[in-house]
Image (cartoon, helix red, strand yellow):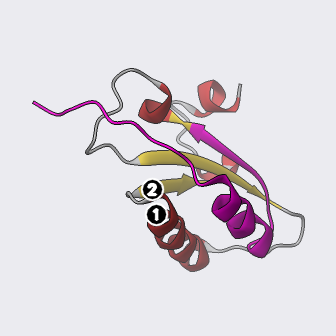
Amino acid sequence: MATKAKFEIPRDRVAEFCKKNRIRKLSLFGSVLRKDFQSRSDIDILVEFESGAGVGMIRLAGLEIELGEILGRRVDLNTPGFLSKYYRDQVLS
């Protein structure tokens, strides 16, 4: 059985990451916000970039790895345009 996980965000490092990568908004969603978040769970993150940031899939994958290293666990980065239609409205609300 998986154990519940406590998760702390190193805010200064995340703020620096966002500034460096022109991220204007970073939001958590998914199991990290619910009681079913486990030690093996990834962290679902919605990012919105500054206008003109020009982020493609390859760069997004690199950012995902870098942020995962900062947070100490695997992350799944999404932008509003890449969210699944099955849960987009729920995440964006």
Image quarter hosting the N terminus? top left
Q: Residue shown at 51%/72% (left/top)? A: 61
92 part of magenta stretch? no
Whole-percent x and y of residue 82? Answer: 60, 52
32 lies above or below 46? above
Magenta stretch: give its range.
1-28
Circle 1 residue? 68
43 lies above or below 17? above
Whole-percent x and y of residue 93? Answer: 71, 25
How crowded pointer 1 is (Cα within 10 Å; few <14, some 14-19, many 20+) is rated as some
Instruction: State the image quarter where residue 35 is shown.
Output: top left
Q: Amino acid at mark 2?
A: Val
Q: Are marks 1 and 2 in contact (CB under 8 Å)?
A: yes
Q: Residue shown at 65%/27% (left/top)? A: 89
Residue at the far right: name it. Answer: 51
Task: Name the secondary structure under disc 2.
Answer: strand
Q: CA distance from mark 1 to mark 2?
A: 5 Å
24 part of magenta stretch? yes
Whole-percent x and y of residue 77? Answer: 54, 56
Circle 2 residue? 75
Q: Residue shown at 59%/54% (left/top)? A: 10
- Tell me which label, 1 or 2, sits earlier in the chain: 1
Instruction: State the image quarter where residue 50 is shown.
Output: bottom right
Q: Residue shown at 46%/35% (left/top)? A: 32
From the viewer's perspective, tell me whether residue 74 is left or right of residue 93: left
How crowded pointer 2 is (Cα within 10 Å; few <14, some 14-19, many 20+) is rated as some
Residue sitting nearer the eye, 85 or 47? 47
